[in-house]
Image (cartoon, helix red, strand yellow):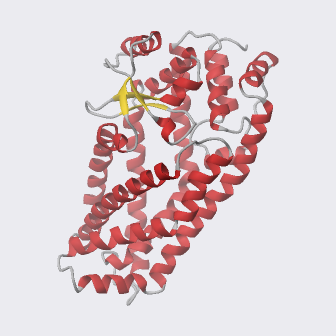
């Protein structure tokens, strides 16, 4: 916990009232255990699907109808992805719809939620089938399969970052140019000052899913896009919005899109090494699966990767917090908005119901951004509001 000087505490309490801070703590006490319940149910289903022989049975049934090995693996993985998604629907709906509505964080309709869930299911199944089938066939054909897999992962990560703002994001929200206004001109002027070539700021209807707020600068190799959620524009003051946009531009200016891509690739390399060693040994379990290239081993691979994500979360989140802190510093150093940074960070926490002073343990495991009290004090220091 970082204590606030009296002047900063007054600003924070005015923007983020104490009753709402208590509500944020209540929400955290609910959602943090729910995260592990969700992961536990996923893991249990994957291990049951593999260990019961159901995976081998489905693979055998498909093999009688699908002769091409790549297509067989793709169909199997798509079915596995869809089956897991359907099993998880009750928990997914509770965590993604019921809880946000109970805490006033969403006005989304059930129809809209299921529409977005269906799009995510279809998109995820296609991507998982393509990537998974390509990996399994590479394992089957090449002894040094992990080298080709590592190269392919690098290409896919870069391609994913490039296509996301143009092809993926519009599947879930509507994007339109932000109409001319003093705020629009200020955002574009800030972008020009930082060498970011942008003539348009896009607004998207984030309110269709949530009352939380967000903005981003995304894209690579000519697909860069500055986007701001309509909730951010509606619930924050113009100077606070400008401060948030300066943070997002900091990510672009400091090369965080490339840095994040590289860190994700290194994580993939570690995961591939685990698959090549631990995964290969575990997958040699006839009749459940013959080897790592056997589609029937896909649930086992998915379970192993899930455990990997759970174990490495503190490391990946710590790297993310470093990146986010650097963008906070960039925003503070490249704007001269008085206490707008303090108000912006406090209001972000208030709107999103983020605990103001989370425990060190919670930050260590869950937080991809510095906690609100740290971000507030960073903004205050850079604005010379504290010694």
Who is closer to the viewer here, 98 or 19?
Answer: 98
The residue depicted at 33 percent of the width and 34 percent of the height is 219
Q: Is 164 positioned to the left or the right of 49 in the image?
A: left
The residue depicted at 17 percent of the width and 80 percent of the height is 67
The residue depicted at 56 percent of the width and 38 percent of the height is 321
The residue depicted at 75 percent of the width and 43 percent of the height is 25
Q: Which residue lies furthest to the left in this view?
A: 68
Image position of 1 with respect to 385: above or below = below
Which percent across, then down, holds residue 147?
27, 59
- Quadrant position of residue 225: top left
Is there any visible trace of residue 144 in the rendered image?
Answer: no
Considering the image in quadrants, where does the N terminus appear? top right
Which percent across, then down, holds residue 79?
36, 71
Give the number of callouts: 0
Q: Is 315 positioned to the left or the right of 34 in the image?
A: left
Image position of 103 with respect to 212: above or below = below
Who is closer to the viewer here, 354 or 318?
Answer: 354
Considering the image in quadrants, where does the C terminus appear? top right
Which percent across, then down, holds residue 24?
72, 41
Which percent across, then down, holds residue 105?
62, 41
Q: Is 372 positioned to the left or the right of 159 in the image?
A: right
Q: Residue furthest right?
A: 6
Is there any visible trace of residue 321 in the rendered image?
Answer: yes
Who is closer to the viewer here, 174 or 269?
Answer: 174
Q: Is 142 positioned to the left or the right of 50 in the image?
A: left
């Amino acid at each position: 916990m970082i204590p606030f000087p009296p002047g900063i505490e007054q600003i924070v309490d005015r923007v983020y009232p104490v009753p709402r801070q208590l509500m944020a703590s209540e929400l955290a006490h609910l959602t943090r255990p729910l995260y592990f319940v969700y992961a536990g149910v996923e893991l249990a289903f994957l291990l049951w699907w593999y260990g019961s022989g159901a995976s081998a049975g489905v693979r055998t049934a498909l093999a009688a109808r699908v002769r091409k090995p790549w297509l067989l693996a793709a169909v199997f993985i798509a079915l596995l992805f869809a089956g897991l998604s359907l099993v998880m629907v009750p928990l997914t709906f509770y965590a993604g719809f019921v809880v946000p509505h109970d805490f006033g964080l969403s006005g989304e309709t059930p129809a809209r939620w299921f529409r977005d869930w269906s799009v995510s299911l279809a998109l995820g199944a296609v991507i998982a089938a393509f990537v998974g089938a390509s990996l399994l066939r590479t394992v089957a054909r090449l002894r040094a399969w992990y080298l080709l897999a590592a190269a392919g992962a690098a290409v896919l990560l870069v391609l994913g970052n490039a296509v996301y703002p143009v092809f993926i994001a519009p599947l879930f929200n509507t994007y339109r140019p932000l109409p001319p206004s003093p705020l629009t001109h200020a955002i574009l002027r800030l972008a020009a000052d930082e060498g970011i070539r942008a003539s348009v700021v896009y607004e998207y209807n984030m309110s269709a899913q949530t009352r939380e707020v967000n903005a981003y600068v995304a894209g690579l190799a000519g697909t860069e896009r500055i986007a701001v959620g309509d909730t951010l524009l509606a619930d924050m003051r113009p100077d606070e919005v400008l401060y948030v946009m300066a943070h997002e531009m900091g990510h672009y200016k400091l090369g965080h899109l490339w840095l994040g891509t590289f860190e994700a690739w290194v994580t993939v390399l570690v995961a591939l090494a685990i698959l090549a060693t631990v995964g290969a040994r575990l997958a040699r379990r006839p009749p459940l699966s013959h080897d790592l290239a056997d589609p029937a081993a896909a649930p086992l691979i998915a379970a192993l990767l899930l455990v990997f994500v759970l174990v490495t979360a503190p490391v990946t989140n710590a790297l993310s917090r470093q990146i986010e802190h650097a963008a906070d510093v960039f925003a503070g150093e490249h704007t001269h908005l008085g206490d707008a940074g303090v108000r912006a960070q406090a209001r972000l926490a208030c709107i999103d119901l983020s605990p103001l002073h989370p425990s060190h343990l919670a930050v260590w495991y869950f937080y991809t951004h510095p906690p609100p009290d740290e971000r507030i004090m960073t903004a205050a220091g850079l604005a010379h509001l504290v010694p």
